[in-house]
Amino acid sequence: MPSIRFPLAALLALVPFAAWAQGAAPTDPQIAAIVVAANQVDIDAGKLAQSRAQSKDVKAFAQLMVTDHSGVNKAATDLVQKLKVKPEENATSKSLKQGGDANLAKLKGLKGAEFDRAYVDNEVTYHQAVLDAVDKTLIPSAKNEELKALLVKVRPAFVAHLDHAKKLQSSLGK
């Protein structure tokens, strides 16, 4: 099976982000659930890539994704506990989880360089979509200043991840 440049699962997972622009903005509890879900999707994919990737650079990137996104999830969880906010599942957080599960299923069927390319291609698509959501929906919609500050604080890491994934993508070729 050939590698797909922009995996369908990743694109489907992003659709609800755009839906917020057409309806009511997400609430802080919904934003918290979206942040946790988005990070967990990348943690799960990173763990799979750590065990399956062929390239040492892809394995190192996967380790970075697990470490960094685990840290963001811990910071988000600590903050919502401090604020006594219960993350509220919503269409976007559920769709992210479903898209993540579909991506994992697709990746589990691949091996070697094909796995590496598919994982990295998804990371490029996913990080761009998450950055777009952070910039266009999550930061502008956050009402709590500490939640907004956390989103602003972690944004540069997502930019760095996207740049790193793009460099890896170029080095892996087609």
Image (tube, rainbow, N blue to C red):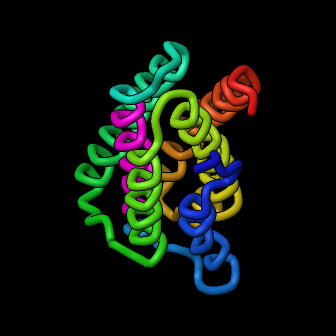
**Residue that appears at 59% across and 46% down:** 122
Q: Residue 169 at x, y = what percent?
A: 70, 30
Quadrant holding the C terminus: top right
Q: Residue 34 at x, y = what percent?
A: 44, 61
Q: Is residue 48 magenta?
A: yes
Relative horizontal placement of residue 99, taking residue 24 as reference (left or right):
left
Q: Quadrant of residue 69?
A: top left
Q: Which residues are magenta?
A: 32-49
Q: Quadrant of residue 18?
A: bottom right
Q: Residue 166 at x, y = what percent?
A: 72, 31
Q: Is residue 160 above or below residue 78?
A: above
> Furthest-top residue in view?
56
**Residue that appears at 35% across and 43% down:** 44
Q: Quadrant of residue 167?
A: top right
**Residue that appears at 47% across and 17% down:** 60
Taking the image as drawn, is residue 131 in sight? no
Relative horizontal placement of residue 1, taking residue 93 as reference (left or right):
right
**Residue that appears at 38% across and 40% down:** 43
Taking the image as drawn, is residue 72 in sight? yes
Q: Nearer the viewer, residue 33 or 121?
A: 121
Magenta stretch prevailing secondary structure: helix
Q: Is residue 63 above or below residue 116?
A: above
Q: Is residue 152 above or below residue 21?
A: above
Relative horizontal placement of residue 169, taking residue 13 as reference (left or right):
right
